[in-house]
Image: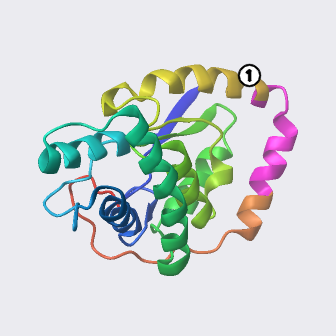
Amino acid sequence: MVLYLFDIDGTLLHAHGSGRAAFDEVFAVQHGIADASAGVRYGGKTDPGIIDEILMRHRGRPASPTEHAAFLDAYVPRLRALLAQHGVEVIAGVLEALQFLAAREDVALGIATGNVRRGADAKLAAADLASWFSFGGYGCDSHVRAELVRPIARSARSSWSATRSTTSPRRARVARRCARSRPAAIPPTRSATPTRS
């Protein structure tokens, strides 16, 4: 098995700043912090880590477990609303790459992202990409980005075993995806550094 892991923001799609905007709105409501994302680099970090970084900057302390939970409970619905409002852009070439890889019987596709699972699912669903991935590592698995790969290996082994026993249906699903896929929009110029939106 060859495991291909994809980040979301800046790799699969552009969310047009919906994630940052949702963070700012929740910080303003729950903590009274305006423009919380100003000066904060989101790329290469996890959602819980960004929450802690912003609170450390403005309040001198990280978030408590209760504050983390309350923040994310408010963030995810707001993220979904902003994604619906602003739309999501699938990066050029992504659908073709996923189609090519998914057609191979020795390949498994997964997600490795600093987004929490609910946020990742919202972005992938908005881009109509969720069905390509059956496992992943997310910001809710660890606040440390480098540790996200550990749970992926366990999920990949389980998913791979199930896929191997249903080879023909998998090929049928790939064929259906190819038939209904639309060309990806040409994105704006991409930054060389990791992005989050």
Observer-nearest of 182 and 80: 80
Q: Position of residue 167 (x, y in %)?
A: 82, 34
Q: Which amino acid type corresponds to the residue marked 1 in the rendered image?
A: Ser
For residue 164, above or below residue 114: above
What residue is drawn where x is 80% and y is 42%?
170
Q: Position of residue 125 (x, y in %)?
A: 62, 60
Vertical relation: 120 (above or below) 67:
below
Q: Which residue is mark 1?
A: 161
Residue 107 on the magenta span? no
* Viewer-side residue, 178 vs 63: 63
Q: Quadrant of the C terminus?
A: bottom left
| Image quadrant containing the N terminus | top right
Element at badge 1?
A: helix
Range of magenta residues: 163-175
User: What kind of secondary structure does the magenta stretch mostly adopt?
Assistant: helix
> Residue 169 falls in which quadrant of the image?
top right
**Relative image position of residue 54 (x, y in whole percent):** 21, 49
Q: How is the image coloured?
A: rainbow
Q: Residues within 10 Å of mark 1 (few under 14, many from 20)?
A: few
Residue found 26% across the figure and 51% down from its top: 43
Left/right placement of residue 182 relative to residue 137 reads: right
Residue at horizontal 80 percent and vertical 60 percent from the top: 176
Q: How many marks?
A: 1
123 or 154, nearer to the observer: 123
Q: In the rendered image, is residue 88 in sight?
A: no
Q: Is residue 1 left or right of residue 148?
A: right
Q: Is residue 66 left or right of residue 173?
A: left
Q: Visible in this render: residue 179?
A: yes
Magenta segment: does it hold 168?
A: yes
Residue under the image location 43 percent in, 68 percent down: 15
- Image quadrant in which you'd find residue 107: top right
